[in-house]
Image: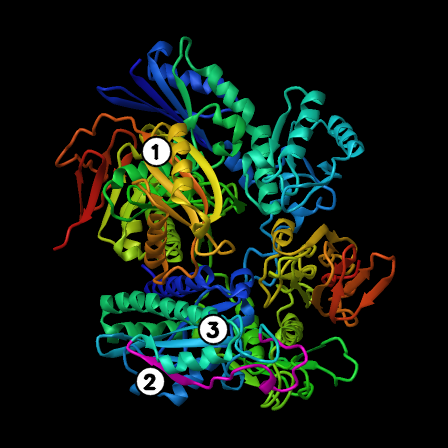
Amino acid sequence: MSDDLKILQLRLDGLAETMQQTLLRCAVSPVVREGADASCALFSSAGEVLALAEAIPLLLGALPGSVGAILEAYPAEGMQPGDIYLTNDPFSGGTHLPDIAVVQPIFAGDTLVALSASLLHHQDIGSTRAGSVPPDATEIFHEGLRLPPILAGRDGAFDPAILRLIRASSRVPDVVTGDLETQLAAGFRAASGVARLADERGAAGFVSACNAMLARAEAETRARLAGLPAGPFHGADALDPVPGLGPCAAEVAVKFQDGGMIADFHGSSRQVAAPVNCVRSGPLSASFYGLLTLLDDDALRNGGVLRCLELRLPEASVVNASPPAAVNARMNMVRCITSALLQALSQADGARMPAPNSGMSFVIAFSGTDATGQRFLSTEIVAGGAGGGPDADGAPAISTDVGNAMNISAEALEASVPMRLVSAEVRRGSGGSGRFKGGDGVRRTYEALADGIAASIRGERFARVAQGAHGGGAPKGSAVTVLRADGAREELTARSAITLNKGDRVVVESSGGAGFGAP
Amino acid sequence: MSTHLAVDFGASFADFVAWDGQGLCSCKVPTGPDIAAVTRQGVAALGLAGPALETVRMVTTAPLNALLDRAGAGVALLTTRGFADTLRLGRQNRVSLYDPVARSPAPSFLVEPDDIHEIGGRNDASGAEVTPLDAGDIDAAIAAIRARGNPAVAVCLLFSHLAPAHELALAERLRAAFPGLAISLSHVVDPAPREYDRTVSAALDAWVAARATADLAAFRAGLPDGFAGDLLLGEGRGVLVPEGSFARQRAVLLTGAPAAAARAGAAAVGGTQDALVIDIGSQSADIALVRGGDPVAVDYGRYAGVDIRAPMVDMVSVPLGGARRVRVEAGAVTFDGEADAPTLDDALTALGRLPGPMSLARAEAQQIVSAAAAQLAMALIRFATRRNVDPARTGLYVMGGTGPLIATEIATAMGLGAVTVPRAPAVAGAMGLAMAPRRTEATARVDRALDDLTDAALADQLDRLDAEVGWAQVLTLTLSARAQMHPVQLALTARPGTVAEVRAALSRAYADQFGVAPPGPGHLFAIRAHRDARTALPPLARRDAPKRDALGLVATEAGAIHLPDGWRIAEDTAAHVLTKVTL
């Protein structure tokens, strides 16, 4: 009566979670620490996900493609204990260049039983700007060091030549190599845990139990999807228009057939000469996330679910860019794809789905140099509101769908940069109207305490906002207002970089969620 | 003066355990609204006289159950101007990543929006005053509190952990306006940065003050005449603190009851092995991990769905217990049934494991019990794997009124061939209080890079802590590789003589926990020193072959154990060990 496969899944999940905690606790890169921008998983030797850590869903699709590309370049049969593989190539399954995936084979005796994989957003990997996310990049060549799948070490240690190459390309070589070592350590921890599990049943028994676990997740997912109407269901969304840049729209048609889901993104815009494009891992994250929202809370979450997914992607598009597209600021496009996909899924499974969420979050950075010459930097993510329904008002000020970032407190912000958070409020009335109202966004008011503070404020939903469901209303759009110390007032656009002087105030307002049902 | 009493007020019963050098006795009394009367009844049943009582220890689940019900308490909150929404905004995270509906874990139910009042006045990040408190805002808040009759007030102002003067000034005004009002100041309750967490701590403290102050007074009133010993409270780490602690940290009463049960489990484990302990009562099953003889504690954790920043046992509560009602849908059994549905206890009765009239068929009853065991086994495995503990290699300890009746089934569902039941399992919380150490504790905030800390400054801090606690048995260092990184806790049983020793300990902690060298030179946030004093219990009378009755039940000092065919039982001084017989 004990559910052997479920227990195996939980134990593997626990090992992936241990890897994830190692990264979150030991990584020096601030975006990993504050934004949890890291992902860990265990894979079968065939490259299927066995277990995933609970992380930021934005990265759900980040590892399967990278692991697949590594296995293609270095077939499993040739892997040796202690091998270390890595890649950060967006066009070989990755995301953007700061995200380096490290993959290590796990052996039980002489048998390759699994692979560990971790992905970590490194602080700097070259490029035209510190931090390796240059907003003005138009080609990947502007974005930093590109590492195709490579064998980066043997016998459990990185090849010093590879480390020298990476160090030579980074502005913070010690931080990057230190964080790579942390990824390696996370892999070793997972390996010892997996080896213990394999010992209990023997290598062959472990592999066959993993295969059974994948098959069961597939069967459960197919049973669930078979109960949905065939479709097609359509969804569409786009980034706010930018002067001089072509449209950045995602379109999707979702069909359910033979217990599988086909997400066809044809009709999406062609890739643009700006870093807002995303590669295949983007729609994969969005679609994997969409599938998981359809499953029960205690469903097995592994590659068996992905067996039920077919992506049809137009080449050289904003949802599946081709070289040499720039991709570093892909996040808003992934959110856009997710919004389009959730629209389609809510037509298929309306009873469980709320109205669209805000579909945005702000990424705000304040930086500069203080009087003693010390550099300061603070990055924060400000969420919008959740959609209303299906049986209650939407939650205000909350990370939604593929987002999962926490806010930053006034006390933490003010301790790290010369800014004052004057107020942090629910932006009342910003959610869409409806029988179930959309959740409100956030209003944060900052005041500069020194001259010459650089503020980078990137958001979405200034012009295009989420649409209400079943007769519900649309939310208020995002807005950023600068109130200069001399009384001047400036309204900013979606992606802005400005300089603040002492006494200047910035009011950041995020969009709410859409309403559900006629009011 | 050599008798001790421990009382655990639960949802249905209050459990009383009394002991002296010779022996131990216990009783269960149905709880009711009159705490003093319940107390008198238990004291009378055990025949205790006031002057003979050396210590009395107490925990109650009443505040915790109210928290689970998301009940209000009429608390008011005073906060810095611009920050009235702090509780509602939370951390902008959600409870479940893959639920299409995003739900916030922020406990905004603790304070009604109309009871939140903003006060002008501001400190900066160095603790310096930017603007003084606004007297008009204070007058308005006092008028509102008077009009609404709030029984308790929480105060959380920005940077008060660095500069408490504004909170202290507000408290003075409040005390003058409302003598006797319960006031919870954030810098007293939780002197650490990040205003959301500190606001939750202060609001929770006021919430417990509003709900539990009267119960505590009633308990004291119910104690026998002539009692002049120490009244001790069980707090969230499963240790005892003086009654006076309640005035500073009311939240000690919040998680004390499940922590006491975890302590009972820990006492049975002994030695250094890891063990999972589960206390299955009438309403819930509480799971904890025991390591090195103590329940594993955390400084921050989600309990009852609320993120609580206070030291407490790392616990998970599952809503499954003897009085939970069954729902059967499509062959699947869950324990969230309607009021007229049978309970898990009804199923146990039908199987002869509890006395009473049988209302269920045997097959149906067995299906319910098996489902309960399977679900609890899965909860234990989930708890363990989330903490990188391998449930197949960890001992299992089961207690509570219901636990020992289904212990072997839980073990089987986890694939284990052995399970241990602590002594007197039906009164586990009270037993945990009886065995909990009495803790003397002090904390020093250091907040310095190890590179900037001299051996002399370290010695000075340690000397002051030693003076405060008498003699520090254990030093718990909160430190991290770099100031902005997540801290780790390091427990040292020997006083570090130099900063280099602290650095070496940090390296060991990173190697043990993460397998890496510390990614930075080290930053020491705080040192906590404590000394524990334990009370000895008379040992359990050892029986090599405890008697099993016709229904498969083995009686203990308090509560019975179900021993099915194919299992055998043995006793040591602390527990009953159940082992599967291998053929």
Q: Amino acid at mark 1?
A: Ala
Front residue of B193/B57: it is B193
Q: In front: mark 3 or mark 2?
A: 3
Instruction: Kindly check if marks 2 and 1 are in contact, taking CB atoms under 8 A apart as contact.
Output: no
Q: Work out how far the residue at label 3 is from the one at label 1, CA to CA, in angstroms.
A: 43 Å
* Residue A82 belongs to the span the image colors magenta: no
Task: Give the labeled residue for mark 3.
Answer: A173
Front residue of A300/A503: it is A503
Q: Which residues are magenta?
A: A132-155
Q: Earlier in the sequence, mark 3 or mark 2?
A: 2
Instruction: Kindly check if marks 3 and 1 are in contact, taking CB atoms under 8 A apart as contact.
Output: no
Task: Give the labeled residue for mark 2.
Answer: A76
* Residue A152 belongs to the span the image colors magenta: yes
Residue at 48% over, 18% down = B36
Do badges 3 and 1 share one subunit? no
Residue that extends furthest to the right in the rendered view of this protein? A487
Q: Please tell me whether mark 2 sits on a helix, a strand or a loop.
A: helix
Front residue of B333/B500: it is B500
Q: Position of residue A275 (x, y in %)?
A: 65, 81
Q: Position of residue A390 (x, y in %)?
A: 67, 60
Task: Give the labeled residue for mark 1.
Answer: B472
Characterize the magenta stretch by its predominant secondary structure. Answer: loop
Q: Amino acid at mark 2?
A: Ala
Q: Chain of mark 2?
A: A
Q: Work out how far the residue at label 3 is from the one at label 2, CA to CA, in angstroms.
A: 31 Å
Residue at 32% over, 59% down = A2
Q: Position of residue A296 (x, y in %)?
A: 50, 63
Write down the quadrant of residue A265 in the picture.
bottom right
* Residue A500 left/right relative to B21: right
Q: Amino acid at mark 3?
A: Pro
